[in-house]
Image (cartoon, rainbow, N blue to C red):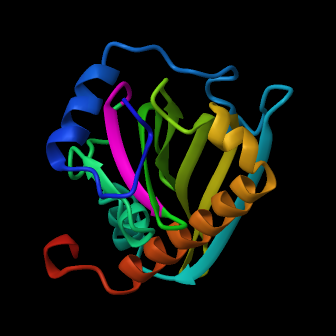
Amino acid sequence: MNRYSLTAPTDRRLDRLRSTAEHENLSYDGVGGSISGGHPAGYHSHSSELTVAADWEAAKSAIRSWSGHRSAGGVLAPETPPLTQGATMAFGVRVLGVWATGTCRIVEVIDHDERFGFSYGTLPHHPERGEEMFAVDKNGDGTVTFRVAAFSKPAGLVTTMIGPIGRLIQRTMTRRYLAGFAAFAASPPAATRQ
């Protein structure tokens, strides 16, 4: 299936992508590197963080609800993927007027007293090859720090051709993820407050 379209992917298309991807292998080297901090040779890496005053439970709910992805304009299948190692998801996101679709699998879930999050890795139907971590750390001063760390390289002709523009798009998306997580944590829906 084509990774790019001028129209938004339908729920049906995303469900089909996810279903097909459940039987595919990860498309990159260095599984686990986004959390450990190591990445394989030949991959670009980037990381960013944002510290905000927020309740710990609300911050964890921001990660759990995929609020960063939604604020970045993403549509997901399933709508709220479970944070379970091995769970497969598909997404669509509009970038520079074009919709890109991709598939990922959760490779690790982090659930410690002072860190919560997950990492997912790319599957063959993705514009990039690599892994990305989304996590929040509990600080001792009433603040939390949202973190995104990734390593990747192009998976096809389009992402290879756009080169540095692709990395700029990744950084822009990372800022949107962080802003979305922070906004959700600052004012979570009543149903998620404890």
Quadrant in which the N terminus is drawn: top left
The answer to which image quadrant residue 21 occupies is top left
Residue name at image x 29 percent, y 51 percent: 76
Residue at position x 22%, y 39% in the image: 13
> Is any part of residue 137 visible from this angle?
yes
Residue 86, compared with residue 191, is above or below; it is: above
Q: Is residue 152 visible?
A: no
Question: Picture coordinates of residue 92 (x, y %)?
Answer: 37, 51
**183 inside magenta stretch:** no
Which of the 4 image quadrants contains residue 140?
bottom right
Q: Is residue 164 left or right of residue 173?
A: right
Quarter containing the C terminus: bottom left
Say above or below: 131 vs 176. above
- List the single residue furthest toward the front: 6
- Left or right: 92 as drawn, with respect to 10: right
Give residue 172's position: percent from left, percent from top. 63, 68
Residue lying at 48% horizontally and 26% vertically, measured from the top left: 123
Residue 89 among those drawn in magenta: yes
Q: Residue furthest right?
A: 41
Q: Write down the region rendered in magenta.
A: 85-94
Q: Give the residue displayed 57% in from the left and 21% down from the top.
A: 27
